[in-house]
Amino acid sequence: MKLYIRQKIISWTDSFSVKDERGNDVYSVRAKLISLVKQLSVYSGSTEVARIQRKLISILPKFLVFVNGRQVTEIQKRLTFIRDKYHLSGLGWDVCGNILDHDYTIKSGGNRIATIHKKWMAWSDTYELDINDSCDPIAALAVIIAIDCVTAED
């Protein structure tokens, strides 16, 4: 399943839509504007299907991912000097590739969960997410958004 996220470079909020290959809105992502911690919610129609929330007290950026009200993973950036590394607890997924260039793959064991590629446009960035059909697309989408939140905080 391919999904696309287009974000404006100059934006006052972290609200955007997630589209399918035909350009139809599949999910919407909205930020909680007034909050002690950064929090984004993923909606299917008017129903919240996932939430990404920054952990309040942590030295390096750490985000919790909830799907249908249940915490599925905690994403934490690891301190390295050569390349960004992330630890995803709970799902058993690994992130490999160039995260800063938004060109990476999420794997479970040797199986591909999702591939993320960022296309640079004039006034907006477009993410292409290729999610394995056997994977939960909501969990994969929420993890990808959380990884982007971690890199945005650097």
Image (tube, rainbow, N blue to C red):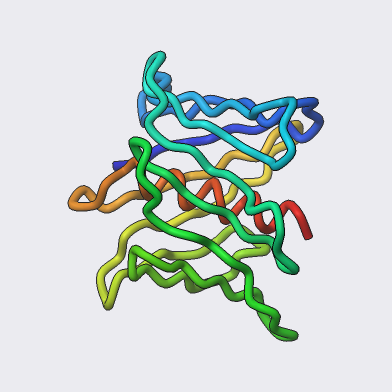
Q: Nearer the viewer, residue 78 or 121?
A: 78
Which image quarter holds the C terminus?
bottom right
Q: Nearer the viewer, residue 125 or 136?
A: 136
Q: Residue at x 55, y 61 (%)?
A: 103
Direction from residue 143 to residue 20 in the image, left or right: left
Q: Residue furthest top?
A: 46
Q: Residue at x 41, y 26 (%)?
A: 48
- In this view, 53 is above or below 62: above
Q: Nearer the viewer, residue 3 or 48?
A: 48
Task: Give x and y (percent) for residue 78.
Answer: 63, 76
Q: Residue at x 69, y 83 (%)?
A: 80
Task: Give x and y (percent) for residue 63.
Answer: 58, 54
Q: Residue furthest left?
A: 134
Which image quarter holds the N terminus?
top left
Asked which quadrant contains residue 120, the reply is top right
Task: Give x and y (percent) for residue 8.
Answer: 71, 30
Asked which quadrant contains residue 77, the reply is bottom right
Direction from residue 82 to residue 52 in the image, left or right: left
Q: Residue at x 61, y 51 (%)?
A: 148
Marks counted in the figure total 0
Q: Nearer the viewer, residue 96 or 67?
A: 67
Task: Give x and y (percent) for residue 46.
Answer: 41, 14
